């Protein structure tokens, strides 16, 4: 329920709805954003699991993460460009651009430093931070979800406390600092 693909899609669809002038715009821009940053990468990963290229949908084997992370980044960048070219609302563009920024930080840490920054924690914290920017203090209750996601990743043995803390920090900073800055510029 709180996997990165689901949270990313839900957040992008919500912000598209919040930022658009019409229902048609919200659906169009929301689906473009969600397809680029969530649906297509998730489909690619699931297809790779079925073909035996990676062990599971979370790609827990770090040596297998390079290509899936690259596909996520390229697809999200392409979605950002498509949204910009189609005249999407500034708030949605700022959100997806902030997602790209967090990926640009997280991917080299995982791929080149061979250190398992938690994408689950990054996305969970980024989602709550973005919702706090959009909705205000009411959304801060979502930090309980972030703590739960971080605890679960450590409890399952997928990450250390350092991995989830680093992921949550990158996600929270991208969305609490960069997202509002790009939204208002």
Image (cartoon, rainbow, N blue to C red):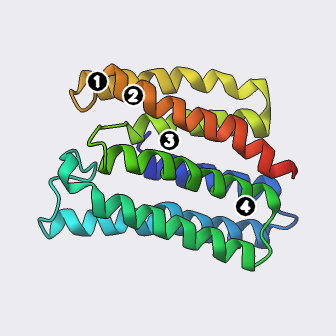
Calculate the distance from the C-alpha at mark 1 to the C-alpha at mark 2: 7 Å
Calculate the distance from the C-alpha at mark 1 to the C-alpha at mark 3: 17 Å
Q: Nearer the viewer, residue 81 or 152?
A: 81
Calculate the distance from the C-alpha at mark 1 to the C-alpha at mark 4: 33 Å
x 18%, y 51%: residue: 63
Of the two numbered discs 3 and 4 on the same chain, state the one appearing first in sequence. 4
Q: Which residue is mark 3?
A: 123
Mark 2 is surrounded, within 10 Å at the Cα level, by few (under 14), some (14 to 19) or many (20 or more) other residues, namely many
Of the two numbered discs 1 and 4 on the same chain, state the one appearing first in sequence. 4
Q: Which mark is residue 164?
A: 2
Of the two numbered discs 3 and 2 on the same chain, state the one appearing first in sequence. 3
Calculate the distance from the C-alpha at mark 3 to the C-alpha at mark 2: 11 Å
x 58%, y 51%: residue: 101
Of the two numbered discs 2 and 4 on the same chain, state the one appearing first in sequence. 4
Above/below status of 167 relative to 40:
above
Above/below status of 134 relative to 6:
above
Residue 181: percent from left, percent from top: 79, 44
- Secondary structure under tag 3 reads helix
Image position of 46 (left or right of 181) = left
Which quadrant of the figure has residue 24?
Answer: bottom right
- Secondary structure under tag 1 reads loop
Above/below status of 177 relative to 12:
above
Of the two numbered discs 1 and 3 on the same chain, state the one appearing first in sequence. 3
Label 1 close to label 2 by CB (< 8 Å): yes
Q: Which residue is mark 1?
A: 160
């Amino acid at each position: 329920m709180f996997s990165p693909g689901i949270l990313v899609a839900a957040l992008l669809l919500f912000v598209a709805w919040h930022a658009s002038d019409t229902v048609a715009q919200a659906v169009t821009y929301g689906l473009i954003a969600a397809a680029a940053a969530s649906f297509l990468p998730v489909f690619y990963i699931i297809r790779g699991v079925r073909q035996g290229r990676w062990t599971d949908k979370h790609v827990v084997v770090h040596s297998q993460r390079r290509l899936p992370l690259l596909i996520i980044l390229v697809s999200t960048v392409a979605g950002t460009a498509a949204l910009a070219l189609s005249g999407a609302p500034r708030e949605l563009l700022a959100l997806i651009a902030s997602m790209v920024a967090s990926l640009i930080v997280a991917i080299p840490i995982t791929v080149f430093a061979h250190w398992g920054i938690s994408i689950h924690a990054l996305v969970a914290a980024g989602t709550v931070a973005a919702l706090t920017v959009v909705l205000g203090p009411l959304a801060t209750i979502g930090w309980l979800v972030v703590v739960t996601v971080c605890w679960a990743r450590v409890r399952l043995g997928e990450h250390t406390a350092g991995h989830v803390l680093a992921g949550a920090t990158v996600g929270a900073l991208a969305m609490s600092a960069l997202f509002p800055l790009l939204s208002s510029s």
